[in-house]
Image: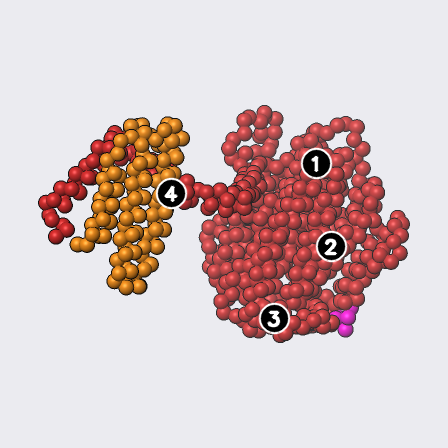
Chain colours: A red, B orange
């Protein structure tokens, strides 16, 4: 029975889209419709989830046989297992709050109906991705979230930076899609199917190539190091877009893909090491970049990227269930952090630079509360939400037989998380105001308050709630030395104190000429500067040269004719000692010939 | 040796001496080269026809082809010299400039 309820819940989501296609009435209650639809879908999906938690029984719904290509059967099938059953209510809950928030945030936008339609389409494609049982359906969802991300980042299309950022997102995602398609092709060749059940049952031996492809796909979609610049640039979109796509749902699609393939990954040590190192590099690098940014949304975007790196590290130490738990808990407080920053931005009349904020502790108490609680949950304060997943991850990484360098990077990144969270709090909330005095700071709207309140309660209790209600999957590490158990807490407290001390000490000092470390961190490690200019220029000029110049001027002109003539001229100048007395030379021929004929009697 | 053979040998030798000893024009050297080729051709054809060595009757024709090529080369050199100096006097070729 819960299978049909789940299908109902997913179907309910598609109703507003269909209503707007048929009626095409753009009345002002459409956004409220959408918000209510999502809340109904959330409540409906809670029932199957609770039944699943009670019974532990997974379901696969295979509906409609689409086509058969020789030996490959493609059908519409939904996999309702541990991962999708828990993720769907979490995602719907977070989306419900974000929809309510964007009722307040995008209130004055003339195309608010279209905005909600885009957000809903995004949610549907994300649900398709999460509940897919075969790789084809997953790919449909994958591409769908990519397209909706493009449309939503470029929402204010009059702004050049927004268009560039949307294009950047598409390009980087496309590079990841190549890996995905390579994995799909390999699976089709070697296991004759795109169904997850058959792949896991067959358990192919040499899985290096498809897992590398899936790792590339995750690198592209989840903004790991190498394909990461699109995520901070994606902050050009409106804040609800950042909260939904680029913190809770879309960017976890890459991690989700790797989690789905955990039966294959747990047998392949090479890929696990690669994943671990990639995640460690990402989490440290983006945490370093977050330290000196001045845009509040960019700091939170880098924070997202760092947490994604942490999830990838968790997969690398062979703990997919912990990574999934971190996905679910991370969604709550990260969305809430984005919504608080949206509240601050709107109240300060679209000011996003933290150097121009300050003193909001007294002016916006509710936002302050939720920002601080969100930051504490992010850094893993004991018994808030983040603690249940993040602390477990650090503990497991400490006690597992893993790469020590990766572990060290992760620990440093954890302390840097505390540092930049302190920086946000210090600059945005504490001290004296640095904005203009006549701004109307108002956070009294019930939409804003209710949505943040829901996520606030989620940030505090969801970790406890979820981790006590799921069935045990892998055995956590039970015994470890005290210092190891307290490592995460110790580095976090170290980060907090260090950041607070430094901020208070240097608060009134003048900024001297930037050191090279500051410039490295502020310019994102020079990665976009180098990679967005040099390789495209090299590629395009090489292709232009080879297309237009290669055949004509090189092969037909230069290789044989001109090179021979050059060579001959140079060598003849080099080695000739003659003076041009040709007649004398010819005469010497004649004398030699005659002499030889006379002396040797050749004709006899 | 028969008279015909002596005749042709003499033609060849006269052309050879004319090739190696000439006064001022490069063109006369080239002409003597052609004379040498002609006498060789006649000699080869007559020998092949007299001894009925049919399989070797390709040889004079191929000789002719190669002689044509070398004549073309020689003439192009002549043209280059003539372009630079206006006449093809041999005493002009004393700079060995390229």
> Can residue A420 be spotted in the picture?
yes
Place of residue A141 in the rendered image (x, y in percent of width and height, measured from the top left)? 69, 59
Name the disc covering residue A488, or none: none
The label number, if any, that marks residue B72 in the structure image: 4
Element at label 4: helix
The dot on residue A193 is 3
Q: Are marks 3 and 1 on the same chain?
A: yes
Which chain does the residue under circle 2 lie in?
Answer: A
Q: Position of residue A292 (x, y in %)?
A: 59, 36
Classify mark 3: residues with Cα within 10 Å, few (<14), some (14-19) or many (20+): many
Taking depth in this image into account, of B6 and A601 the one nearest to the observer is B6
**10 Å crowding of disc 4: few (<14), some (14-19), many (20+):** few
Query: In the image, A279: left or right of A106?
Result: left
Q: Which mark is residue A122?
A: 2
Residues indicated by labels 1 and 2 sit on the same polypeptide chain = yes
Mark 1 touches mark 4? (CB < 8 Å) = no
Give the Cα distance between marks 3 and 1.
49 Å
Q: Nearer the viewer, mark 2 or mark 3?
A: 3
Towards the viewer: A130 or A370: A130
Residue at position x 49%, y 42% in the image: A553
Q: What residue sits 89% from the left and 56% below the top? A: A23
Q: Give A221 or A51, whichever is nearer the viewer.
A: A221
Q: Chain of mark 1?
A: A
Helix, strand or loop at mark 2: helix
Q: Residue at x 75, y 44 (%)?
A: A155
Mark in front: 3 vs 1: 3
- Quarter the N terminus of chain A occupies: bottom right
Residue that label 1 marks:
A352
């Amino acid at each position: 029975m819960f299978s049909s309820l789940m299908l109902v819940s997913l179907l309910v989501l598609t109703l507003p889209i269909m209503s707007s296609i048929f009626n095409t009435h753009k009345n002002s209650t459409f956004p409220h419709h959408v918000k209510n639809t999502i809340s109904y879908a959330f409540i409906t999906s809670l029932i199957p989830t609770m039944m699943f938690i009670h019974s532990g029984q997974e379901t696969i719904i295979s509906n409609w046989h689409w086509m058969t290509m020789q030996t490959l059967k493609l059908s519409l099938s939904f996999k309702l297992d541990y991962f999708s059953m828990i993720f769907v209510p979490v995602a719907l809950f977070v989306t419900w709050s974000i929809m309510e928030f964007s009722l307040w945030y995008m209130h004055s936008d003339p195309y608010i109906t279209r905005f909600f339609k885009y957000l809903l389409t995004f949610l549907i494609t994300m649900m398709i991705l999460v509940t897919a049982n075969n790789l084809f359906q997953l790919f449909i969802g994958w591409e769908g979230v990519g397209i909706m991300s493009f449309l939503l980042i470029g929402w204010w299309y009059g702004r050049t930076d927004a268009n560039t950022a949307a294009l950047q997102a598409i390009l980087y995602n496309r590079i990841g899609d190549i890996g995905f398609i390579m994995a799909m092709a390999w699976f089709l060749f070697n296991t004759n199917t795109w169904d997850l059940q058959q792949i896991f049952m067959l358990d192919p031996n040499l899985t290096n190539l498809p897992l590398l492809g899936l790792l590339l796909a995750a690198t592209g979609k989840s903004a790991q190091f190498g394909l990461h610049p699109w995520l901070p640039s994606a902050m050009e979109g409106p804040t609800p877009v950042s909260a939904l796509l680029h913190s809770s749902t879309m960017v976890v699609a890459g991690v989700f893909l790797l989690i789905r393939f955990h039966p294959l990954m747990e047998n392949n040590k090479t890929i696990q090491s690669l994943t671990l190192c990639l995640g460690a590099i990402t989490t440290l690098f983006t945490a370093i970049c977050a330290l000196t940014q001045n845009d509040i949304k960019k700091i939170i975007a880098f924070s997202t990227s760092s947490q994604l790196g942490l999830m990838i590290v968790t997969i690398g130490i062979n703990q997919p269930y912990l990574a999934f738990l971190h996905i679910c808990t991370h969604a709550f407080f990260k969305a809430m952090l984005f919504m608080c920053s949206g509240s601050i931005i709107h109240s300060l009349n679209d000011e996003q630079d933290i150097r121009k904020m300050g003193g909001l502790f007294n002016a916006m108490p509710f936002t302050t509360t939720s920002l601080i609680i969100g930051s504490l949950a992010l850094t893993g304060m004991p018994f808030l939400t983040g603690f249940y997943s993040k602390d477990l991850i650090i503990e497991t990484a400490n006690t597992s037989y893993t790469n020590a360098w990766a572990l060290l990077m992760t620990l440093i990144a954890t302390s840097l998380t505390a540092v930049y969270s302190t920086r946000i709090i210090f600059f945005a909330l504490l001290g004296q105001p640095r904005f203009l005095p006549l701004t109307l700071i108002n956070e009294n709207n019930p939409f804003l308050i209710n949505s943040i309140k829901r996520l606030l309660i989620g940030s505090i209790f969801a970790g406890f709630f979820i981790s006590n209600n799921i069935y045990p999957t892998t055995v956590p590490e039970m015994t470890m030395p005290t210092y190891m158990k307290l490592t995460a807490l110790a580095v976090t407290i170290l980060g907090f104190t260090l950041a607070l001390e430094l901020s208070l000490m240097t608060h009134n000092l003048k900024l001297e000429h930037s050191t090279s470390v500051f410039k490295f961190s502020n310019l994102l490690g020079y990665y976009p500067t180098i990679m967005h200019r040099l390789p495209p220029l090299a590629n395009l000029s090489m292709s232009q040269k080879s297309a237009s110049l290669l055949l004509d001027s090189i092969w037909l002109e230069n290789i044989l004719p001109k090179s021979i003539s050059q060579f001959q001229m140079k060598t003849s100048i080099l080695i000739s000692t003659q003076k041009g007395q040709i007649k004398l030379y010819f005469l010497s021929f004649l004398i030699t010939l005659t002499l030889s004929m006379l002396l040797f009697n050749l004709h006899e | 040796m028969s008279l015909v053979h002596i005749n042709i040998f003499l033609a060849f030798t006269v052309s050879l001496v004319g090739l190696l000893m000439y006064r001022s024009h490069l063109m006369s050297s080239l002409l003597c080269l052609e004379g040498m080729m002609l006498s060789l051709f006649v000699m080869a054809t007559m020998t092949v026809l007299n001894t009925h060595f049919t399989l070797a009757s390709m040889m004079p024709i191929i000789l002719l082809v190669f002689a044509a090529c070398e004549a073309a080369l020689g003439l192009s050199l002549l043209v280059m010299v003539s372009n630079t100096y206006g006449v093809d006097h041999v005493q002009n070729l004393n700079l060995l400039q390229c």
